[in-house]
């Protein structure tokens, strides 16, 4: 019987032995190498260029959101609260105390944003700013002037208000009031204007003066034609060529109210060509109240519309206008009645044809209107009678009660 191999005895270390402990020189070298590596890392980090400043409206790079660069103070609502032990060593149940505000916003009441430095991305959709030369982008939209670069929103808003006041001749852009600017306040320089003014004065004295619009009022540049006030609406003076103040406009709405294009066309029977002629019928444009991107609304002065429609150029008198309106109403009514009669005749014709088909195809006199007529194009369904056994052939025979067709069947 062979003896089993005995493993060599394990080396033991006495309590007072220090054979495996590092030497002081080895510890000094290790610490020196660690400090050198730390200095090299700090120098490399200092020489690294700083990250680019974030651009307003631009997307953050993925590297700024990685876990390696995430600060320790960032909030993470998905992470659970650290487990805490009480004085007895037991773990407390989880709570919702991990949802807390950030420290820098915990004591502030609001967060202030500089909207002038933010970029409107239009929700990620393409807009006229992305492709200003694309006609499909501008379809149905008004072309508004964009804010110039380098101008803040407050400055751009002031510029827009200034342009609006200048277009309406209001505020600081309103012309000054002076008696010297009126025709009656200075000597006439033009002989033709002087002769015209003399003729008007003679007609006014004789009581035969009718004026430009037939209301007996004289139009003087810079004066109200009703009360001779110098505080007129300069926008109306530029567009309509009529000098009138705001108080007279409110007092006399039957003369100085504004009409839409539809009202001028339907009530005074004017054509689109006449309304589009600026020399005959000037108009004032306003934004469309129904849709912003619709065509602007055209407003006409009632005084000018009535003067043209009731003048010799168009209808001549209110009676002629009423007669023309009644005539067009009769024509429209006759057109509707003719259309109704044509539809009624077509209904009668189709009814007579159906009655004729009913009588011809077997409907008979008892057939009523609305019942189905069986014609040659209708699909026939056989109504088989009782099967009869033929003793000679041993087959069953059946017949359709409506068309008389017979078939034979063999039963197994």
Image: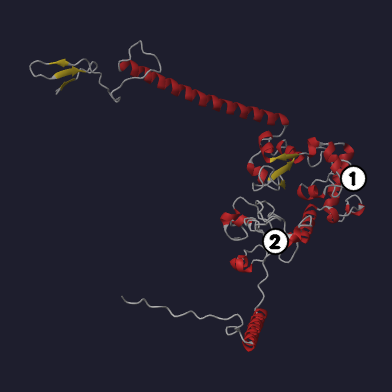
Image quarter of residue 350: top left
Identify the disc placed on residue 172. none
Residue extending farthest to the top is 366
- Residue 186 location (% of width, % of height): 91, 53
Q: Depth check: give the residue in front, 282 or 141.
A: 141
Q: Crowding near pointer 1: few (<14 within 10 Å), some, many (20+)?
A: some
64 sits left or right of 407 in the view: right
Residue 61 visible, this orientation: no
Few, some or many C-alpha atoms within 10 Å of disc 2 (few <14, some 14-19, many ≥20)? few
Split into 4 quadrants, where in the image is the C terminus? top left
Marker disc for residue 229: 1
In this view of the protein, can residue 359 be seen by the observer? Answer: yes
Asked which secondary structure carries label 2, the reply is loop
Q: How many marks?
A: 2
Q: Position of residue 270 (x, y in %)?
A: 66, 38
The residue drawn where x is 90% and y is 52% is 177
Q: Secondary structure at mark 1?
A: loop
Q: Quick one: which residue is furthest to the left in this view?
A: 392
In the rendered view, does 263 fall on the left or right side of 18? right
**Position in image of residue 356 (x %, y %):** 35, 17
Residue drawn at (16%, 18%) of the image? 397
Left or right side of 52 for 219? right
Q: Which mark is residue 118?
A: 2
- The answer to whether 298 is drawn above or below residue 85 in the figure is above
Tell me what residue is drawn at x 71 percent, y 29 percent: 319
Quarter in which the N terminus is drawn: bottom left
Q: Quadrant of residue 151?
A: bottom right
126 vs 221, nearest the viewer: 126
């Amino acid at each position: 019987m062979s003896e089993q191999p005995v493993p060599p005895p394990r080396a033991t270390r006495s309590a007072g032995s220090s054979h495996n402990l590092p030497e002081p020189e080895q510890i000094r070298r290790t610490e020196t190498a660690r400090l050198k590596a730390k200095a090299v890392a700090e120098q490399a980090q200092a020489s690294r260029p700083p990250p680019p400043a974030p651009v307003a409206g631009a997307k953050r790079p993925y590297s700024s959101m990685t876990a390696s660069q995430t600060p320790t103070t960032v909030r993470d609502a998905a992470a659970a609260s650290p487990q805490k032990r009480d004085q007895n060593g037991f773990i407390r149940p989880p709570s919702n105390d991990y949802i807390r505000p950030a420290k820098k916003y915990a004591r502030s009441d609001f967060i202030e944003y500089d909207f002038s430095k933010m970029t409107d991305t239009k929700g990620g959709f393409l807009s006229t700013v992305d492709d200003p030369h694309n006609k499909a982008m501008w379809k149905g939209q008004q072309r508004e002037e964009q804010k110039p670069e380098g101008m803040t929103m407050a400055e751009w808003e002031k510029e827009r208000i200034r342009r609006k006041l200048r277009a309406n001749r209001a505020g600081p852009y309103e012309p000054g009031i002076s008696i010297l600017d009126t025709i009656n306040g200075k000597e006439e320089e033009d002989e033709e204007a002087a002769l015209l003014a003399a003729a008007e004065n003679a007609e006014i004295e004789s009581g035969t003066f009718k004026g430009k619009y037939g209301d007996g009022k004289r139009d003087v540049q810079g004066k109200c034609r009703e009360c001779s006030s110098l505080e007129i609406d300069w926008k109306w003076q530029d567009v309509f060529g009529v000098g009138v103040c705001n108080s007279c406009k409110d007092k006399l709405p039957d003369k100085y109210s504004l009409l839409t294009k539809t009202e001028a066309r339907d009530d005074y029977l004017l054509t689109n060509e006449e309304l589009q002629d600026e020399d005959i019928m000037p108009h004032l444009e306003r934004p469309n109240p129904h849709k912003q991107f619709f065509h602007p609304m055209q407003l006409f002065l009632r005084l000018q519309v009535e003067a043209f429609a009731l003048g010799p150029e168009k209808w001549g008198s209110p009676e002629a206008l009423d007669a023309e309106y009644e005539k067009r109403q009769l024509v429209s009514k006759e057109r509707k009645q003719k259309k109704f009669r044509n539809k009624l005749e077509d209904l009668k014709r189709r009814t007579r044809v159906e009655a004729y088909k009913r009588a011809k195809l077997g409907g008979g006199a008892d057939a009523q209107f609305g019942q189905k007529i069986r014609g040659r194009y209708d699909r026939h369904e056989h109504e088989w009678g009782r099967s009869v056994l033929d003793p000679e052939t041993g087959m069953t025979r059946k017949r359709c009660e409506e068309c008389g067709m017979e078939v034979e069947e063999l039963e197994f």
